[in-house]
Amino acid sequence: MRVGAELLRTEAPGALSLREIARRAGVSHGAPRRYFPTHLSLLSAIARSGFADLSAEVETALRAAGPAPRARITMLARVYVRFAAANRGMFELMFRHDILQSGGRLGLRDASVPLFHLLVELVTAARPDPGPPAEITAGAIWAALHGTAELWNWGSLTLAAGAADPAPFIDAILAAHLGPDPEGQP
């Protein structure tokens, strides 16, 4: 798993073959099958480690963000987009549909759900009025953040909007779904 995660730092997720991971780990090409019966099970384990890393970064950032709900959700959003930019291959693997759609069998959904539940909790605490169910608002924020992260990684936001930083897009997403920041932060 460690070798696969390291490989993602330099290569696209398509380079994560069992044979290549085994070669770089210095083991026989059949060795990974002792622990991971399928290629997807290995990829899922690597992606779960990405969710663990992202969750750890979010937890650390939230401790520094203080108690204000809007500051906490802004911090989570910025960490999410920053993680995507710093870990492009891992981020892509973490959201591969073929792995996510394999249900609970590979455990990837279980690794991703706590982060979404945290976002729902933060949305519930940050909204000035009830509005739509928190799960819907959190889902809309997540979709917009994910799209921002992908467009930022592809260079599309820089090209289209001349943006040098994704922060204004994050702030606009949160303002659109949560209203103006009660603390007056952008």
Image (cartoon, rainbow, N blue to C red):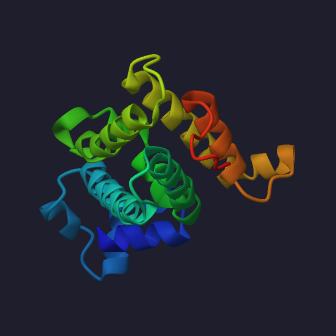
- Position of 49 compared to 134: left or right? left
User: Is residue 99 shown above or below 68?
Assistant: above
Given residues 33 and 5, the one toward you in this image is 5
Residue 91 x/y as whole percent: 48, 54
Q: Residue placed farthest to the bottom in the image?
A: 26
Q: In the displayed orientation, state which residue is furthest to the front.
A: 183
Q: Quadrant of residue 126?
A: top left
* Left or right of 162 in this view: 185: left
Compared with 140, 41 (above or below) is: below
Residue positioned 27% across, 70% down in the render: 29
37 sits left or right of 6 in the view: left
Residue that protrudes farthest toward the top in the picture: 132
Q: Residue furthest left?
A: 34
The residue at 71%/48% (across/down) is 168
Query: Is residue 4 visible from the viewing direction of this image?
Result: yes
Q: Is residue 97 left or right of residue 183?
A: left
Whether residue 20 is visible here, answered yes or no, is no
Q: Position of residue 114 (x, y in %)?
A: 27, 44
The answer to which of 115 and 12 lies nearer the viewer is 115
Above or below, 14 against 107 in this view is below
Residue 115 appears at what percent x and percent y?
A: 34, 45
Query: As displayed, is residue 157 above or below residue 124?
Result: below
Number of numbered discs: 0
Image coordinates of residue 51 in percent, x first then y, are 34, 55
Residue at x 26% of width, y 56% of height: 45
